[in-house]
Image (cartoon, rainbow, N blue to C red):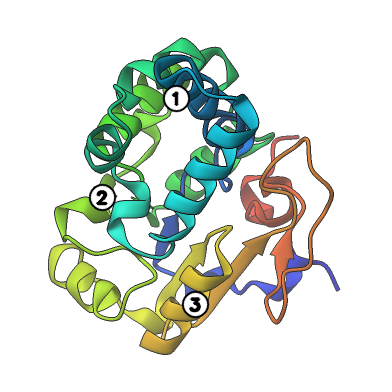
Amino acid sequence: MGLRAMIDWQAIDTVFLDMDGTLLDLHFDTYFWVEHVPRRYAEKHGMPLADAKDYVMKRSHSMLGTINWYCIDYWSNELDLDIALLKEEVDHLIAVHPHVTDFLDAVRASERRVVLVTNAHMKSLALKMERTQLGGHFDAMICSHEFGMAKEQPGFWQTLQQREPYDPRRTLLVDDSLAVLRSARDYGLSWLLAVYQPDSTEARRDVGEFDAIESFADIIPQAYLKR
């Protein structure tokens, strides 16, 4: 049975969508943090690239799962680099996953509420919306920095409910982060989907206990499929 058949759209009123790795190809972010930032850090400090990569990786992993992991201002201060400006240097790598716009148009046409819920910093969100022109496809866009906590953290989904009222039992969340999906499940969200290949340049991954999509073509509501 395909995912489209498994999802009862009549039981869903609200669709929450992650951005990086879900709607957008994670290759941009992977390349940016694994290659571009260390290269600029090495240039600034006159050190070997391998040492810079090791330093940036260790510093970033120490913040995993917290709001600082995603915060451009935090990393600009920690690394003494203009992270927002460095993102613009490689923004040609920002790309939308296949069938995303078809899915967004179909769900909005079905009169369900479509909300972008991202951990990305506001500056990163602005850059990516400018580059992709996806902003007009959402009823609302919410950045976790507004709440001072990441989606992985306890309390996020309750805080979100105060800002964006929703029934957890009638909400679909699509997110590439297993930690985020587990956090949402703990709060009671009923419809959860992971993403098999957040980064198009990397292999299909194990998504653990969650159902997952190959692309958004897997779950476009049947009545709104383009002929």
43 to 20, vertically: above or below: above
10 Å neighbourhood of mark 3: few (<14), some, or many (≥20)?
Answer: few
27 displayed left or right of 1: left
77 to 71, vertically: above or below: above
67 to 83, vertically: above or below: below
Q: Earlier in the sequence, mark 3 or mark 1?
A: 3
Q: Earlier in the sequence, mark 2 or mark 1?
A: 1
**Residue 4: where, in percent of width, then height?**
72, 63
Nearest the viewer among 185 and 36 is 36
The quarter of the picture where the N terminus appears is bottom right
Q: Amino acid at mark 3?
A: Ala
| Residue underneath mark 3 | 11
Q: Earlier in the sequence, mark 3 or mark 2?
A: 3
Q: Choose mark 3 or mark 1, whichever is in front.
A: 1
Q: Which label sits on residue 142?
A: 2
> Label 3 vs label 2: CA separation?
23 Å
Nearest the viewer among 4 and 148 is 148
| Residue underneath mark 1 | 41
> Label 2 vs label 1: CA separation?
31 Å
Secondary structure under badge 3?
helix
Nearest the viewer among 132 and 53 is 53
Secondary structure under badge 1?
helix
218 to 178, vertically: above or below: above
**Residue 50: where, in percent of width, then height?**
64, 33
Secondary structure under badge 2?
strand
Q: Residue at x 72, y 47 (%)?
A: 215
**Residue 62: where, in percent of width, then height?**
42, 61
Q: Contact, CB < 8 Å: mark 2 with mark 1?
A: no
Q: Amino acid at mark 2?
A: Ile
**Residue 154: where, in percent of width, then height?**
30, 81
